[in-house]
Image (cartoon, rainbow, N blue to C red):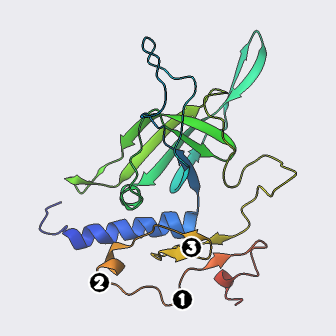
């Protein structure tokens, strides 16, 4: 597509529409754990580290393709191994000042994954400097590689805390919503080319009916 017709304004529109789907409709998140290579000890010969040090987890909106898991049997019995594919928004990573790297970790639910590939999905209308996002491919991390408490909703049953996401709140380009900071930016709103939504972010309450989303305010 010629650059004559795909200008920065069209690129901003594409970005904002994609963010709206991922952040305000789908509502899936992963948690990103960056390895601190500056303070993690790496073996001189094997170039591996047995005890990694991580930055605090960062919540990232994503479109997750979940694998049901692969059963492997060995002399010790059977084990289930998961893999994951997650697509993240390019400009959302820029807004969060985040660069995802192979060898870092993500969590989804109660499972932690080591990133094995970070793939650029596509260029926007062939413009090499603009990408739609990245596909993250991860394999389930071996026990002991990352010893962290899983964030967000999980499929585990914990006696001390709820593991279900009880409230979903849209972001809609606001710096904060009732759940806290969002680091969300919608380009057309920021450039005063589009007004912010009059009603603000909507939410879905625990029972799915008594919520502002359904007009029960």
Q: Quadrant of the N terminus?
A: bottom left
Residue 26 x/y as whole percent: 57, 63
- The residue identified by callout 2 is 193
Residue drawn 36% across the image and 47% down it:
121
Q: CA distance from mark 2 to mark 3?
A: 21 Å
Residue 119 x/y as whole percent: 37, 40
- The residue identified by callout 3 is 170
Residue drawn 49% across the image and 30% down it:
40
Residue 206 x/y as whole percent: 76, 71
Lateral position of residue 72 relative to residue 63, left or right = right
Lateral position of residue 155 relative to residue 142, left or right = right
Residue 211 x/y as whole percent: 71, 81
Residue drawn 60% across the image and 80% down it:
202
Q: CA distance from mark 3 to mark 1?
A: 11 Å
What kind of element bears circle 3?
Answer: loop
The foreground one among 147 and 41 is 41
What kind of element bears circle 2?
Answer: loop
Lateral position of residue 131 relative to residue 25, left or right = left
Query: How many discs mark residues in the rendered view?
Result: 3
- Tell me if mark 1 has few (under 14), some (14-19) or many (20+) residues whose alpha carbon lies within 10 angstroms of its own: few
- Tell me if mark 3 has few (under 14), some (14-19) or many (20+) residues whose alpha carbon lies within 10 angstroms of its own: many
**For residue 183, which numbered disc appears in the image?**
none
Location of residue 139 by image quarter = top right
Which tag, 2 or 3, sits closer to the chain's start? 3
Q: Residue furthest right?
A: 159
The foreground one among 30 and 64 is 30
What kind of element bears circle 1?
Answer: loop
- The residue identified by callout 1 is 199
In the figure, 104 relative to 130: above or below? above
Which tag, 3 or 1, sits closer to the chain's start? 3
């Amino acid at each position: 597509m010629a650059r004559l017709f795909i200008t920065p304004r069209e690129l901003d529109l594409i970005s904002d529409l994609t963010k709206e789907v991922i952040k305000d409709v789908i509502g899936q998140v992963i948690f990103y754990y960056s390895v601190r290579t500056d303070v993690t000890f790496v073996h001189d010969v094997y170039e591996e580290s047995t005890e990694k040090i991580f930055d605090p987890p960062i919540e990232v909106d994503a479109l997750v393709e979940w694998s049901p898991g692969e059963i492997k049997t060995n002399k010790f019995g059977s084990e289930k191994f998961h893999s994951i594919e997650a697509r993240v928004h390019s400009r959302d990573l820029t807004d969060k000042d985040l660069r995802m790297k192979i060898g870092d970790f993500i969590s989804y639910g109660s499972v932690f994954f080591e990133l094995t590939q970070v793939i650029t999905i596509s260029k926007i209308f062939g413009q090499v400097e603009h990408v739609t996002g990245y596909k993250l491919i991860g394999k389930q991390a071996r026990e002991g590689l990352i010893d962290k408490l899983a964030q967000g909703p999980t499929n585990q049953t914990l006696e001390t805390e709820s593991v279900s996401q009880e409230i979903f709140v849209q972001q809609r380009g606001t710096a904060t919503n009732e759940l806290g900071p969002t680091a969300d930016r919608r380009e057309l709103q920021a450039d005063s080319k589009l007004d912010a939504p009059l009603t603000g972010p909507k939410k879905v309450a625990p029972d799915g009916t008594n919520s502002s989303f359904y007009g029960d305010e």
